[in-house]
Amino acid sequence: MPRLLVVAGIYHLLFCLWTNAWPHHYFDWFGVERPRHPMMWRGMGLISGVFGLGFLIAARSPVRHWAIVLVGFIKFNLVLILFVLAAIEGAVPMGVGLLVGLDDLLWWFPFAAILWAAAQAHVGRPASGAPPLTIDEAAAHYRLSSDETLAEASEKGLIVLVFLRHFGCTFTRKILRELEDLKQEAERRNGRLVLVHMLSPGGENEYLRNQGDVSRIADPMCELYRAFGLGKGGFFELFGPKVWLPLALALVRGCGIGHVAGDGLQLPGAFLFHKGRILSSQRAETQALLPDLPGLFRELPVEDKPESVSA
């Protein structure tokens, strides 16, 4: 993607230079009458040069600078639409069709592919198709808000990992309303509550408000979610009959619905994690899963019961 954007940037800059240094070349080559106002043609070239600079900037990080790519993609589409409308009316010389093909249609498909890759990345689906991290790799890589890795924290004591859906989700909002109770329940059982979310580090503070003392892990690429076996929801997992009653009850209790802050397809889960091992798990079958800590601890093997797990 970076190389393609560099090529697109250089092309648009060269087009800018060509139209301004030799404004009549194109028209003479294709036997088209020279424009009476060459400044308009030169202005088109300058606009192309601006796009070229933008593409070179976006080449540094195509996924991060997806908005620049999107603006270029919109420009390609508008030009193509205008060309088709003019061609239908028979008001376009054939030479213009070649220019449109080189300047817009040529770039349509690769820019569409870049935007698709950016969209996949923003919802936590690696564009490269790389396999998910192992539990050990993920635990060694991801850090808590206290700056220790998940692996280090799990060596010190039992971790109660709660993987959230996006912060606008009604069920996430319900969890946050009951967060203090969850924290006390985890501590009562010699566990440490850790929330995993999909925003960049610090982005969760707006939603936690006065509950910032709870440990968090930022996982905007959903790599930790994938390592723990949490996938994306389809229509029935997100909107099926099993969701209707829990959703209605949560709404009646005032949890509400917010804007999507994270991946709207990601399913939640809860785990007991100690010394690099998952001791018990609750992987969501629908988005309506709420962490059931008593249920998690009931599933613990006898040797890993809270009284035998160091705090």
Image (cartoon, rainbow, N blue to C red):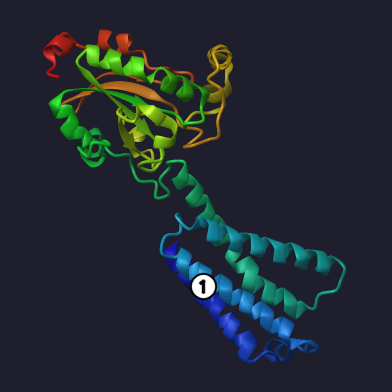
Where's residue 218, x and y in %? 34, 38
Q: Height in image: 307 above or below 209?
A: above
Q: Quadrant of residue 280?
A: top left
154 vs 96, left or right, is left
Q: Please indicate, yes or no, whether residue 42 appears anywhere in the rendered image.
A: yes
| Residue furthest front in the image | 210
Where's residue 125, x and y in %? 43, 42
Residue at left offset 58%, top offset 66% = 107
25 vs 150, left or right, is right
Where's residue 289, x and y in %? 44, 18
Q: Which is nearer the eye, 220 or 148?
A: 148
Q: Height in image: 6 above or below 128?
A: below
Residue indicated by mark 1:
53
Label 1: state its secondary structure.
Answer: helix
250 vs 33, left or right, is left
Q: Which is nearer the eye, 289 or 30?
A: 289
Please identify the quadrant where the C terminus is shown: top left
Tell me the crowding category of disc 1: few under 14, some 14 to 19, or many 20 or more residues within 10 angstroms, Cα based: some
Q: Please indicate, yes or no, whether residue 305 appears anywhere in the rendered image.
A: no
Residue at left offset 27%, top offset 16% = 186
